[in-house]
Image (tube, rainbow, N blue to C red):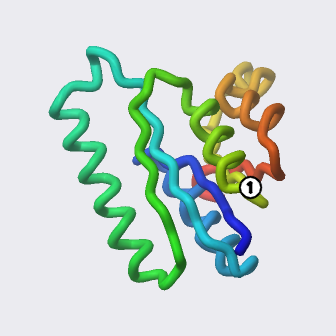
């Protein structure tokens, strides 16, 4: 079975990526792997960990209702999110990796975010970048 991997954050761009990844998984007859990546460190305390888990519980309920085969992966390893996404895509021999992009100012449009750029350049599969509200 083919696999679609999606990077998820509880922000509009993460929700847009998840929505599109669900659509793509349905169209392709694929399983879905949702990756929620956190760097960890001092700012990732017990409260933030509980909030992240609650967010993923909401995603789990939503995906269970979708009928898709899915896996949720939450990483807290000190790696950049791009590294986690690329590693998971490689582990699952993913056919597609979906990421969300945030809107940028006119100057910011000249430079793509470093995490998105890293995924686009280093992913072992096709990458679909989705903007919130698209």
Q: Say if 118 sits above or below 86 in the image.
A: above
Going 44% across and 73% down the picture, which residue do you hit?
63
Q: Position of residue 25 (x, y in %)?
A: 66, 73
Picture quadrant where residue 124 is located: top right
Q: Is residue 73 left or right of residue 97?
A: left
Q: Position of residue 35 (x, y in %)?
A: 51, 48
Picture quadrant where residue 41 is located: top left
Nearer to me, 133 or 120: 120
At mark 1, the secondary structure is: loop
Q: Say if 65 sits above or below 84 in the image.
A: below
Nearer to me, 94 or 96: 94
Image quadrant in which the C terminus is located: bottom right
Number of dots carrying numbers: 1
Image quadrant in which the N terminus is located: bottom right
Going 66% across and 55% down the picture, which residue do you hit?
92
Mark 1 residue crowding within 10 angstroms, few (<14) / some (14–19) / many (20+): some
Q: Position of residue 128 (x, y in %)?
A: 76, 53
Q: Which residue is mark 1?
A: 93
Q: Say if 87 sits above or below 72 in the image.
A: above
Instruction: Looking at this view, name the residue that lies furthest to the left.
Output: 47
């Amino acid at each position: 079975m083919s696999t679609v991997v999606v990077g998820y954050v509880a922000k509009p761009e993460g929700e847009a990526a998840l929505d599109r990844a669900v659509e793509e998984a349905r169209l392709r007859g694929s399983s879905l792997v949702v990756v929620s990546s956190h760097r960890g460190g001092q700012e990732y305390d017990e409260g933030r960990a509980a909030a992240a888990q609650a967010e993923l519980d909401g995603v789990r309920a939503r995906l269970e209702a979708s009928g898709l085969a899915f896996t949720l992966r939450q990483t807290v390893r000190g790696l950049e999110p791009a590294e986690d996404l690329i590693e998971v895509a490689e582990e699952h021999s993913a056919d597609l990796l979906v990421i969300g992009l945030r809107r940028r100012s006119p100057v910011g449009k000249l430079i793509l975010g470093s995490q998105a750029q890293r995924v686009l350049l280093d992913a072992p599969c096709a990458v679909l970048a989705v903007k919130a509200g698209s």
